[in-house]
Image (cartoon, grey):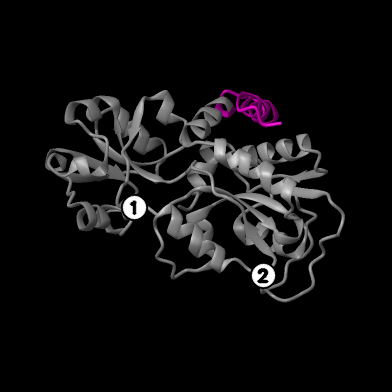
Amino acid sequence: MTKSLLRNAVYACATLSLMALPALAADPFGTAAPKRQSKGTIIVGSANFPESQLIATIYAKALKSAGVPVETHMNIGSREVYIPALIDGSIDLLPEYSGSMLTYLDKNATASSPTDVATALKAALPKGVSILTPSAAQDADTVTVTQATATKYHLASIADLKPVAGDLVSGGAPEWQTREEGAVGLTRIYGVTFKSFKPLDEAGPLTLSALVNGQVQAADVYSTDPSMAADHLVALSDPKSLFPAQNVVPIIATAKVNPIVIKTLNAVSAALTTDDLIKMNVALGNHESFNEVAKDWLKAHNIK
């Protein structure tokens, strides 16, 4: 999944706050010696959208509570900025999404299931970079319906759509019609073909409005969108892995990995769920601060 500019605008993400990052080489995976210092401080960074900053804040607070010295540099930018920064030692730790990170590193990757994506990602990582245990939480594309539609047609899985899709209208970005991870894959993998398709936007306000108002009965919606909770939407399960897994995973400088860091971040990953992300995104949308939302989540899960 690629975070769209529209989605970033919807979440009102902040402007870059690391303008002082060192200049990055044209080849981000070159062999230049890293700037990383040997001190124990871990510099935690985030991408330039709120969910990434929230998870990074959780990582930072958990590590600090475990006695690990921490600095934070949030809202760094896109992968084209923060991955080279991770490699050159400007930052040490970030939250990532497994499928998107794999595609960034290997454009020809075909892994789809959570296990296969994690395995392929480990193999694709540049030297000096590691991942820890992925979380069950995912921010992925989903085929989503309203609770009323799910109840009426007894829908829990994408597979359940097959006998009824001919009566339903789907909606999403125009390119959804031609994507393997869209209408093409729905037909090929699940045998699902909708009555018609309504071109809207990429999991944005037009799509959500059309779904809630009944103009479409199924749509591509991101799994942690606050509307999932606010509008009582149902993300249908994807047992055949049409959409590549997008598990939240800590990506970290190998030099900064130690037993305390592993134990702490694995505890976060073990506790974090997609529903948690939805609820926390709702809280951010209600103008609660990153620090407060992260602190409340850590307290609720007894992670200190």
Disc 1/disc 2 C-alpha distance (Å): 29 Å
As drawn, the label of residue 40 is: none
Residue 134 in the image: x percent, y percent? 54, 49
Which residues fall within the magenta stretch? 284-304
Residue 285 in the image: x percent, y percent? 55, 27
Seen at 56% across and 63% down, the residue is 122
Secondary structure, magenta segment, majority class:
helix
Residue in front for this viewpoint, 91 or 251:
251
Q: In this view, does 42 lie to the left or right of 241?
A: right
Residue in front for this viewpoint, 36 or 107:
36
As drawn, the label of residue 241 is: 1
Q: Would you place residue 119 above or below residue 172 in this image?
A: below
User: Circle 1 — which element?
Assistant: loop
Seen at 67% across and 62% down, the residue is 129
Quadrant of the drawing holding the C terminus = top right
Farthest residue toward the bottom?
31
Q: Can residue 154 be seen in this view?
A: yes
Residue 201 in the image: x percent, y percent? 37, 44
Residue in front for this viewpoint, 18 or 90:
90
Residue in front for this viewpoint, 271 or 236:
271
Q: Which amino acid, by three-letter code, is at mark 1?
A: Ser
Seen at 25% across and 57% down, the residue is 184
Seen at 72% across and 49% down, the residue is 259
As drawn, the label of residue 127 is: 2
Q: Is residue 103 visible?
A: no
